[in-house]
Image: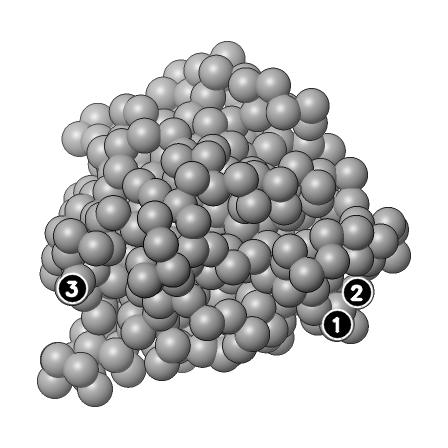
Amino acid sequence: MTSSEPLLSIVIDNYNYGRFLEQAVESALAQSYDNVEVIVVDDGSSDNSAEIIASYGTRVVGIAKANGGQASAVNAGFAASRGDVVLVLDADDFLKPEAGASVMGCFRERPDLSKVHFRLTVVDESARSTGAVLPPRRLRLPRGDMRDTLANCRTYVMPPMSGNAYRRSAIERQMPMPEQIYPKDADEWLSFTAPILGPIEAIDEELGCYRMHSANLSSRNRLSDGETFAAHVEEGACVRRKQADLFRDLLGTRIDAIAPRDLSHIRQLLILRKIYPAQCRYGWSTLTLLLRGIRAAFLANEVSAMHRPFWALWFLGVALLPRRTAFSIVVPTLDARRRPLLLRRLLGQRG
C-alpha cells in the first residue's frame, strides 16, 4: 500500500471505557491497510481515558470534549476526519487486522457504494469469543440497492456500529446528526440513511469483535417510565423523517411516515399511545396503529408465517384491552428475560 491509496478514517468514540480503550486503539493502528488515520474522541470520561489517549502522542488524533452522548462524539470525530471512508469503532470493541483492507477493497471496486458492512465476533469482557456472531449466521447480510427496502421498512439486518464503514460522500449530508435524539444508538442514523445515496456491500466474514460486558449487558429498561420510552421511540421516528427528506430531495419520491413493513416501530408507537399517552406527541390514533400493526404483522420480512397470527393478536390485545392488562402483555414481548416458557417457545427463543 502507498499513500496514494484512499484514506480510511477510523473514529473511536469513548466514554469511560479506559479498561478497553487501548485494545480498540491498538487494533486500529495495526490495520494491514496502510493509509489510515485514527481519531479518538473522549466524551468527557472521568476514568483514565485521557491518559491512555495522550500516551499515543501523534499516532492518533485525540479530541477531548464535554460529555454529550454518542452522537456528539461521532459528530466531533467526523468533523476532524479527512478520510474518503469513515469507520466508527466503539471503544469497547476492536477490529481484526484485515478489516481495513477488506473494506477499502470493496470501495475501490465499487465507487458507487455508500456503505460496506461485516459481521462481528461476540467476545466477553476479557476478549474471549463467546461463540456468537452479530448479526447471527442465520440472518443474511443484505447487499445491493436498499431503497425499495427502506421505503417499506425503516430498518434492515445490520451489525452494530463497529461493523459498518461509510463512504464520506454518502453520510456528510446527514452530518452532524441530532445530538439530543441520539445519546446512544447513533449507528441507526448512519446505517438507515446512507443506503438511500447508493448501494451497500456485505463482507460475510467476522472482521471485528463486539464486546459483551456489564455495561452493555444491562441495557436500559425502556419501559421504566414514559419519558425514557418516548425518547426511544423518537429515535426511530427521527430516522424515518430523515429518510423521507432524502427520498423526496434525491429521488422525488414520497414515502409513508410509518413504514408499512416496520413492525417494530408500529409496535412501539402503539405502546406509547396506549401505555404512556401523555408522552405521545404523534397524531396517529390507537385504531390507526392497530390496523397498521395487523397489516405489518403479515408483511414484515423478519416475521415467520407461524408468528404472524401471534403479532396480529398482540396488536388487538394491546389496543383493545384496559391499559393495565395491555401493559402485562407488552412487558414480556419487549423483555426476553421476563417471558414465560410458553411464550419463549412460541417466539422460537432458546433457553
Q: Which residue is mark 3?
A: 112
Check disc 1 and give the amino acid type.
Lys
In this view of the protein, which residue sits in the foreground, 232 or 324?
Answer: 232
Q: CA distance from mark 1 to mark 3?
A: 34 Å
Q: Nearer the viewer, mark 2 or mark 3?
A: 3
Image: 147 above or below 123: below
Check disc 3 and give the amino acid type.
Asp
- Residue 285 x %, y %: 37, 71
Q: Earlier in the sequence, mark 2 or mark 3?
A: 2
Q: How is the image coloured?
A: one colour
Q: Is residue 141 left or right of residue 315?
A: left
Image: 45 above or below 161: below
Can residue 130 be seen from the camera position used here?
yes
Report crowding for label 1: few under 14, some 14 to 19, many 20 or more residues within 10 A (C-alpha): some
Q: CA distance from mark 2 to mark 3?
A: 37 Å
Which numbered disc covers residue 65?
1
Q: Earlier in the sequence, mark 2 or mark 1?
A: 2
